[in-house]
């Protein structure tokens, strides 16, 4: 009985720690800044490979700075907001 309680508590602590790390990475970017693919993926809480697929499919706004791939923080925030259906 105690063992199950300890396991549940341990699992909750691990989830909180993982979410805290992702939150800190995402908060490191401020409005108006360009994010690296790693920062953008952390902000969206997705895998970097998923981000690249979305970019290749044209499903997410991105920019090229020279040969570097970047994501505008403000554009990504707007992109994540629900879209109003046609009026």
Image (cartoon, rainbow, N blue to C red):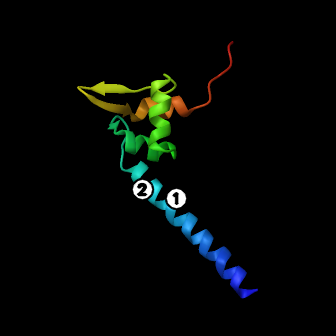
Q: Which of 73 and 40 is in front in this view?
A: 40
Is residue 62 depicted above or below 43 in this figure? above
In the displayed structure, 26 sits above or below 1; it is above
Residue occupying image coordinates x 57% and y 64%: 15
- Which quadrant of the figure contains the N terminus? bottom right
Left or right of 67, for residue 22: right
**Badge 1 vs badge 2, beta-carbon distance below 8 Å:** no
Left or right of 10 on screen, residue 22:
left
CA–CA distance between discs 1 and 2?
9 Å
Question: In the picture shown, does residue 19 fall above or below 12?
Answer: above
- For this view, does 13 lie left or right of residue 35? right
Query: Residue at horizontal 35%, vertical 34%?
Result: 32
Who's the residue at 44% across and 42% down the image? 48
Residue at far left of view: 66
x and y, in percent, of residue 4 in the image: 72, 80
Q: How crowded is mark 1: few (under 14 residues within 10 Å), some or many (20 or more)?
A: some
- Residue furthest out toward the bottom: 2
Q: Tell me which label, 1 or 2, sits earlier in the chain.
A: 1
Q: How crowded is mark 2: few (under 14 residues within 10 Å), some or many (20 or more)?
A: few
Give the x, y percent position of residue 83: 62, 25
Expressed as whole percent of the image width and height from the top left, the position of residue 29 reads 36, 45
Relative depth, front residue between 33 and 42: 42
Vertical side of 25 occupied by 44: above or below: above
Mark 1 secondary-structure assignment? helix
Which residue was labeled with disc 2? 24
Report which residue position mark 1 lands on.
19
Residue 29 got which mark?
Answer: none
x then y, percent, for residue 54: 50, 30
Q: SS class of the residue under badge 2?
A: helix
Which residue sits at x=25%, y=27%? 67
């Amino acid at each position: 009985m105690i063992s199950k309680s300890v396991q549940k508590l341990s699992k909750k602590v691990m989830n909180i720690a993982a979410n805290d790390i992702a939150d800190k990475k995402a908060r490191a970017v401020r409005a108006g800044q360009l994010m690296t693919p790693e920062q953008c993926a952390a902000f969206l809480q997705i895998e970097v490979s998923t981000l690249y697929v979305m970019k290749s499919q044209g499903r997410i706004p991105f920019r090229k700075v020279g040969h570097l791939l970047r994501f505008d923080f403000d554009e990504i925030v707007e992109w994540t907001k629900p879209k109003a259906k046609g009026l």
